């Protein structure tokens, strides 16, 4: 599988008065053709800014100050706005957070909005576009009768189906889904996730799935990147991230997850957690951004950025990755939590 999208040393900052918020700070990441990559992290860690940077739809007070975003080898940051528009229209779609009728035109029938997107982006005539919208509504398991419903008449789950249909309408190569299931009940989340994955396989698109929900990510992602305070701390195959996490933060997140297979052991020993809070993005700590919360932080962690350490197929950014790579999440965190 070749790299469809390569993000190299990307830096996106927000400017608020005198403050500079380093929302994305030197991120390198590749998305392969046809893969699902999960970007996991607490809210405010920079996931959404990363997504908006790829599409160059950042708010006015944000600027990409460094790096490259290569899509099929072309640097999106060097394209004109018109060329970038074509990328958004034909190659990369986004499904925004949660179901909100505001993300669609409230005065226009949902199906007509999808048909208009097809007409505009794919250059089909309106009658063909309506036929294609009907097919898409059937694909997302909304009957054709829903073509003529206004967004406020739809339930939260139905709205997300319309947004999935809209995202697929231009036959993109990459879909970025930013917390698409937030605000929906768990049954609908499972049904929509199933649907999204089925359509992803059918159309062969790559999916970049941004979420704070690690458990959901385990079910769908081929690889997972863990983000924290504008940085990626670890990236690797999903199985390795869940079975052999390397970075102390990843160990903390994984150890905090209730696991069916380990339920007895977890009941006996208790779950672990990561104490403390993420740093202020306008004033992140020097060196390793995780050092104020890391129980094994040394002097070097406070002054020097951690190196990129490759272990197997994973990459972790930690000065002591080699030393701690084989320690289980519980054995790593418990001595500090249960003293
Ligand atoms: Fe902890 Fe240091 Fe590794 Fe950061 S670099 S995670 S502070 S050990």
Image (cartoon, rainbow, N blue to C red):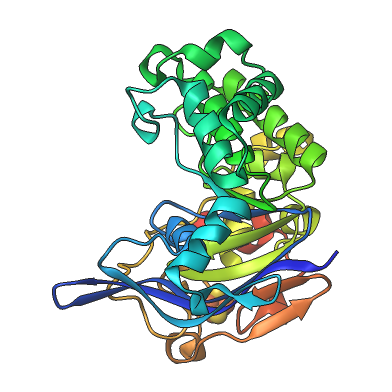
With respect to residue 71, does 138 lie above or below? above
User: Does residue 233 lie above or below 128 as drawn?
Assistant: below
Instruction: Name the residue nearer the viewer: 92 or 35.
Output: 92
Q: Residue furthest left?
A: 17
Query: Looking at the picture, how far across and down is residue 71, in whole percent?
Result: 65, 69
Quarter of the image that includes the N terminus: bottom right
Of residues 194 and 53, the one nearer the viewer is: 53
Image side of residue 200 versus residue 98, left or right: right
Quarter residue 289 falls in: bottom left
Q: Position of residue 122 (x, y in %)?
A: 62, 44
Residue at 56% from the left image edge and 46% from the top image edge:
121
105, above or below 84, in the image:
above
Task: Name the residue at 67% across, 17% down.
Answer: 141
The residue at 53%/55% (across/down) is 88
Looking at the picture, tell me which residue is in the foreground, 155 or 252: 155
Viewer-closest of 301 and 128: 128
Quadrant of ligand 1 in image: bottom right
Residue 339 is at least partly visible in this image: no
Q: Is residue 14 visible?
A: yes
Instruction: Identify the residue shown where x is 40% and y is 12%.
Output: 153
Q: Position of residue 274 (x, y in %)?
A: 49, 56
Q: Total number of numbered labels? A: 0
């Amino acid at each position: 599988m070749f790299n469809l999208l390569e993000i190299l040393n990307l830096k996106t900052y927000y400017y608020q008065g005198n403050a500079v918020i380093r929302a994305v700070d030197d991120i390198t990441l590749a998305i392969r053709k046809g893969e699902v990559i999960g970007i996991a992290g607490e809210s405010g860690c920079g996931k959404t800014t990363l997504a908006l940077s790829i599409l160059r739809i950042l708010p006015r007070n944000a600027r990409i100050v460094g790096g490259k975003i290569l899509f099929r080898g072309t640097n999106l940051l060097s394209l004109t706005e018109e060329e970038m528009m074509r990328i958004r229209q034909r190659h990369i779609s986004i499904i925004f957070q949660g179901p909100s009728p505001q993300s669609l035109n409230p005065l226009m029938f949902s199906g007509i909005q999808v048909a208009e997107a097809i007409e505009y982006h794919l250059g089909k005539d309106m009658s063909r576009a309506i036929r294609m919208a009907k097919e898409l509504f059937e694909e997302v398991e909304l009957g054709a009768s829903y073509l003529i419903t206004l967004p406020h008449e739809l339930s939260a789950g139905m709205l997300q189906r319309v947004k999935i249909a809209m995202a697929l309408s231009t036959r993109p190569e990459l879909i970025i889904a930013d917390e698409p299931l937030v605000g929906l009940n768990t049954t609908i989340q499972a049904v929509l996730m199933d649907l999204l994955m089925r359509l992803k396989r059918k159309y062969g698109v790559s999916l970049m799935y941004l979420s704070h929900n690690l458990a959901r990510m385990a079910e769908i992602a081929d690889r997972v990147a863990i983000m924290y305070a504008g940085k990626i701390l670890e990236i690797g195959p999903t199985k390795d991230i869940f079975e052999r996490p390397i970075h102390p933060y990843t160990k903390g997140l994984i150890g905090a997850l209730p696991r069916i297979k380990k339920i007895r052991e977890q009941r006996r020993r208790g779950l672990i957690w990561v104490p403390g809070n993420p740093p202020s993005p306008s004033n992140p700590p020097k060196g390793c951004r995780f050092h104020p919360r890391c129980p094994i932080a040394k002097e070097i962690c406070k002054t020097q950025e951690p190196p990129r350490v490759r272990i197997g197929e994973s990459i972790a950014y930690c000065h002591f990755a080699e030393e701690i790579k084989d320690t289980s999440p519980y054995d790593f965190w418990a001595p500090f939590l249960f003293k």
